[in-house]
Image (tube, rainbow, N blue to C red):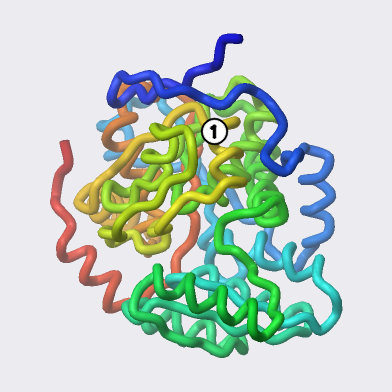
Amino acid sequence: MCSLVILDRRRGAAVPRNKIAPMSDGSIPIPEDIRAARKSLADRVVTTPTWQWRSRELTERLGDDTAVFLKLEIFQVTGTFKARGALLNCLDLPEGQGVTAVSAGNHAIAVAFAAQATGRRAKVVMPENADPFRVEAARAWGAEVLLAPDVHHAFERVRKIEREEGRYFVHPFDGPTTALGTATLGLELCEQVPDLDAVIIPVGGGGLCGGVAAAVKQMRPACRVIGVEPTGADSMHRSFAAGEPRSIERVDTIADSLGAPHAAQYSFDLCRRFVDELVKVDDDAIRHSMALLFREMKLALEPAAAAATAALWGPLRESLRGQRVALIVCGTNQSPERFAEHLRAAPERVP
């Protein structure tokens, strides 16, 4: 049998893709289940707006026939898309079941919110270099926060908590329930802008990208789905090339929300099935896009939320010119001081 291939157009190299076959656990988030999940979440999460970006710089860069839409998860409860998957996981648990999580910040905040919303207690582990703004936000939602030297040690510690305290581990990016939660974002986008040619999705561990891609590709099969990773956290690129989940030695990017130390099987499978292409962007491109979106759209974003814009502004500029493109603006939780530091370091131009 012939296998499908996915073409990384930036490199011009064909990468083997999984056959269209059942997922590793035999299931994918289908539209009927995604709609049911959105109904379960109800008004405990926000149906975030999709806003068309109109500006002089956009027209100069991409032409006046390119339409760009921003799916603004910055207006989600807790400030990021993470609330969707975290809450859906907690809604599935027995009453009073404690939870734990590992995160550089946004997932920890979301799990703290979801635990509070469902009447349970959360203990989360965060790396010591996490933005103090995020640490305090998780505590403000009622979580007990523990700090670890780095994200690899944080994963080890949270597994110990899961094992010794009997808490449910709400994974930051893997698993069917988490993907079903993120797929509700894709559902909303398809309903808000039904005639998209492409959607660009930030990739960390793949939970956001896999869920949104599953929704978009099943509801709008002709829409091109593109994932974008930072160059210093490219675990999904390495996994696609290897044909199986792979780890990276260390995370080296300002986009710490996309700094997954490894890919996991379910989200990897989902991305392999529904993502058409992957590209990478460096930290300078991300900073430039943060400054651009602040200047043009008045949005104060964390680095991860500017990654999709950086991809459109750079490696995808020519291939998406003249098309209707959605960018997933995945959220923002950062201190004003750190945001200002990134703007000061942003280059005026990128290639």
Establish if 207 lies above or below 45. Answer: above
Q: Is residue 305 left or right of residue 58?
A: right
Which residue is pictured at 62% across the width and 69% down the height?
A: 77
Label 1, on which residue? 272
Which residue is pictured at 79% across the width and 53% down the height?
A: 37
Q: Which of the two residues, 302 or 87, is positioned nearer the viewer here? A: 87
Q: Which of the two residues, 126 or 293, is positioned nearer the viewer here? A: 126
Establish if 227 lies above or below 107. Answer: above
Q: Is residue 165 left or right of residue 102?
A: right
What is the total number of numbered labels drawn onto the structure image?
1
Establish if 156 lies above or below 216. Answer: below
Q: Position of residue 100 (x, y in %)?
A: 62, 77
Q: Quadrant of residue 111?
A: bottom right
Which residue is pictured at 75% across the width and 70% down the height?
A: 90
Q: Quadrant of the C terminus?
A: top left
Establish if 66 lies above or below 183. Answer: above
